[in-house]
Image (spheres, helix red, strand yellow):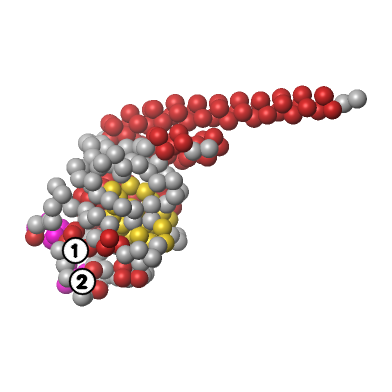
Amino acid sequence: MSTAHNREKENKKKLQQFLGDLALLGSLQGFQYFQPWLRGKEELLLTVVNEDVGWRSPRFPGSVASSLSSSSSGGCSVNGGVLGSEERALLLSSRISEGYLLPASPSDHELAVPEVNCTLFLLAGYAKYGRPYAWIRSNHERLVNIGGADSLVRDTPMKLKSLADWSTQGTQVWEVVSELVTLCTSPPPLNPFSLDMRFVQSLPQAQRLLASGALVNFLERIVVNGNPQEAYHSRVVEDLDRLHRFHVQSLWDVQRSRAEGQADRAGEDQLGQP
């Protein structure tokens, strides 16, 4: 078996793992600075907060079909201003070296619109490219200061460090999310994965149990498989500990409610007997 064949097989395996984690992320809700929305098996829309002004996670996916123009929402920028030329160079990949790596649908046809004070990104792992890429789906001008006439430029993938490491060491989904949140949200949060516990607590009892369990699973992956040298790693560990306790309490609440319901039904049955 040739080395090239082995490499291709390994790349396919890496991409499938990435898409699996992408699907897991798309099922989650309750983050403070971003909201994922899975769209198909290869795409995830990520709504990221522009400015941290006590933003709360929406009850529904942060990106919803709307007739509103995405240009109406506030722009995302570093330190609240337009990015400089060097920063813009970091955001867009070189079209000369990589060609036009277009997403499945151009940004001009995007139906999903971010919430107010948010920017929309597309994170995808298309089989035809053999690796993941990220595209800006709203606020292009404020992020990269490009003209709107050339749609191919607008659909050029972002040049992210987390994705640049794909060929050498692979990329974890949360690494991309962390980089996008740090880039977009002002001021950059100490923990990109901070939870909006008020939202999680507001969910119906059974949904609260499922949501907290799914979040525990995701944060555990970051703690176990992530880089402990990342500044946010210790904060994720702290959040995970609190979330574990909350999840156990939610489980007890569900079990208690079921037991009380069974007791009530048993009492009604006894009263109904002659």
Please say whether residue 212 is visible from this viewpoint: no
Residue drawn 35% across the image and 71% down it:
109
State the residue position of label 2.
148
Percent coordinates x, y for residue 113 in the rendering: 35, 60
Residue drawn 30% across the image and 57% down it:
121
Residue drawn 58% across the image and 30% down it:
254
In terms of depth relative to the viewer, which is nearer, 181 or 158? 181
Earlier sequence position, callout 1 versus callout 2: 1
Q: Main secondary structure of the magenta part?
A: helix
The three-letter amino acid code for the residue at tag 2 is: Gly
Percent coordinates x, y for residue 190 in the rendering: 23, 37
Q: Quadrant of the N terminus?
A: bottom left
Q: Quadrant of the C terminus?
A: top right
Left or right: where 79 falls relative to 158: left
- Alpha carbon distance from label 1 to label 2: 8 Å
The image quarter containing residue 127 is bottom left
Q: Residue furthest left?
A: 85
| Residue 31: mark | none
Please say whether residue 195 is visible from this viewpoint: yes
State the residue position of label 1.
141
Percent coordinates x, y for residue 203 in the rendering: 49, 38
Q: Label 1's element?
A: helix
Number of marks present in the image shown = 2
Disc 2 packing (10 Å; few <14; some 14–19; many ≥20): few
Disc 1 packing (10 Å; few <14; some 14–19; many ≥20): some
Which residues are the magenta region? 86-98
Q: Does the stretch in magenta take in 93?
A: yes
Left or right: where 201 falls relative to 92: right
In terms of depth relative to the viewer, which is nearer, 219 or 115? 115
Left or right: where 183 falls relative to 200: left
Percent coordinates x, y for residue 43 in the rendering: 39, 60
In terms of depth relative to the viewer, which is nearer, 186 or 271? 271
